[in-house]
Amino acid sequence: MNTFQLFNGLTFAALLFVVASGFTLIFGLLRIVNLAHGALYLFGGYIGFTVATRTGSFVLGGIGAMAAMAAIGFVLDQGLLRFVRGHELRQVLLTLGFALMLNDLALVIWGGDSFTVPIPPMLRGGTRLFGVFYPTYRLFVLISGLVVFAALWLLLNRTRLGALIRAGVDDAEMVEASGVNIRRVFLVTFLIGSALAGLGGLMGGAFLTLYPSADAEILVFSLAVVIIGGRGSLVGVGVGSVLVGLLNTIGQVMFPELAYFVIFGPMAVLLAFRPLGLFGRAA
Amino acid sequence: MTQRPMQTKSFAGMSGRAVIAALAAVAAAAALPLVLTNYQVGLATEILIFGLLAMSIDILAGFAGRTSLGHGAIFGVASYVVIYAGAQAGLPPAAGLALGVVAATLLAAIFGWLAVRTSGVYFLLLTLALGMIVWGICLRWTEVTGGENGLRGDVRPAFLVTHSAFYWAVLAAAVAASFAMWRFVRSPFGLTLRGIRDSESRMRSLGYNVSLHLFIGFTVSGFFAGIAGALYAMFNDFVSPSTVALAQSVEGVLMMIAGGVGTLFGGFVGAAVIIALENVVSAHTERWQMVLGATFILIMIFAPEGIIGKLRAMLARHTSR
């Protein structure tokens, strides 16, 4: 693997981190496997694309995508998931139904063509780094991933909300018993997680393009990241993203026919022998 | 568990009334081609095939407490093997059928070996991921699977080419397979699976090898999913990555749940409801996925026990007054 491919793997890992960190926050705290997360990614990407092309501003596109996905997350959590609280399986399957609806809605609005979010002028072109000429935008994605990691780390470790979320991951009942409105913490977490999916959609939409089955692909990669890293662990998502990003690049370069196997083979074996992932803890 | 009333007469483990009901259902199903159009007979065939798939998922979901999102892959691998054996390798249909079912069973054994260590949501995620591996291989291994274009091949034996003849053959297979599944879940082995569903730790402390039982349960379930997949290959004459995709597993699970988790024969009801709905909706609008998603959500919120379970509960409320 040369430097260029290494960069490819790392930038993909950064995108995966943004998407999967939202997924793992929700999975870790609310115990909900949100299979609509991929659909939120794609839908957020489409909205970001529309806002960014209409206004000509990449930043506004990002804000639009995050706000819209937080709103859809609100509808999903408060409008639908509230009726099946406490039933793990029903929650999972409900989010699957929601994903089907969201994808079809996206197909109605944007059609089956693929779109690429316009890259702002200052990020176009390439940059020379470690002896290779590499697309500037992908380096921007890499840095954004690191920024999101730092922001989430500060949120979880340096704020009251973060302390409540961490406590909730360990023992939600106990937090509630000590007088905290855990439902509100749950809701805020769900909104943050959904907004991160939207942000990922915009970022990914600029270099992976957006098309009708992109949601399933990113969802499966996110699942792999979370399964490898372990539920509700930020460091786990970071390590998982880097592993999956690099494995994916290795797979595509060396065994294009078996690219999927290169990621999911190790993941299946890991899950079978360490069901909670590398950094997961028993509930 | 409910106590069965004492029976004086029984046949093959069925009470007299159950035998009559089963015979009536089979006779009614067998008479269908006499009154339906060819297109409708095709739909009925599809219902039987997917009913079998839903039942095979129900063996795990309803009786071992583990919902699999990987059965579409097991089903689809049987379809791939049957078409490949018939169209590419030139084997006779019977050999192709057998190979398809064997391949599905082997795949299920691998899935099972990995998946029995997990439960709940993790079981769901692992089976989903395993199914995705199969999908990825079918999509990329172009020389064998034909990649995105899939494989086409007329693998139906000559005497089954008419719609009705094939329908009767599928009906015979469905009756035999569902009877076998019914015996399986009512056997002492099936009771052990139910024990594991209700309390894994208790079964373990009673000395049962929980992993081994789940492994065998998974493999048997995959065997039946393979039969459904092999029949589907003959029904459709075509297989592509979408046959092994997640959507296939999802539809199977939805049919199983719509029919009623743990009712086994509900699989046919669920398959009939979903396939009928698909046809009605598709005739009026292209938004089938939207309706499918909404159906999923509504069933999860209002009738998680399925249509049969819901009717049973309503009936029980009525009769008990």
Image (cartoon, rainbow, N blue to C red):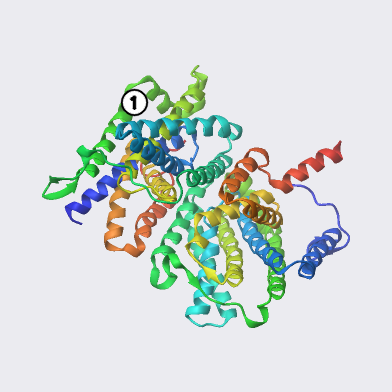
Seen from this angle, which residue lies furthest right? B8
**Residue A191 visible somewhere in the drawing:** yes
Residue A214 in the image, given as x and y percentages of width and height: 41, 49
Residue position marked by numbered label 1 in the rendering: A155
Q: Which residue is painted at 45% across and 41% down in the image?
A: A37
Q: Which residue is painted at 77% across and 69% down in the image?
A: B30
Residue B17 in the image, given as x and y percentages of width and height: 86, 59
Q: Is residue B183 above or below residue B258?
A: below
Residue B208 in the image, given as x and y percentages of width and height: 59, 53
Q: Which image quarter: residue B13? A: bottom right
Q: Quadrant of the C terminus of chain B?
A: top right
**Residue B63 visible somewhere in the drawing:** no
Q: Nearer the viewer, residue A190 or B103?
A: A190
Residue type indicated by callout 1: Leu
Residue at mark 1: chain: A
Q: Nearer the viewer, residue B211 or A189?
A: A189
Q: Nearer the viewer, residue A159 or B209?
A: A159
Seen from this angle, which residue lies furthest front? A54
Q: Residues within 10 Å of mark 1 (few under 14, many from 20)?
A: some
Q: Which residue is painted at 63% across and 38% down in the image?
A: B301
Query: In the structure shown, which secondary structural element does the residue marked by tag 1 occupy?
Result: helix
Residue A230 in the image, given as x and y percentages of width and height: 39, 41
Q: Nearer the viewer, residue A193 or B216?
A: A193
Q: Which residue is painted at 53% across and 70% down in the image?
A: B238
- Horizontal arrangement in the rendering, residue A160 relative to residue B246 (left or right): left
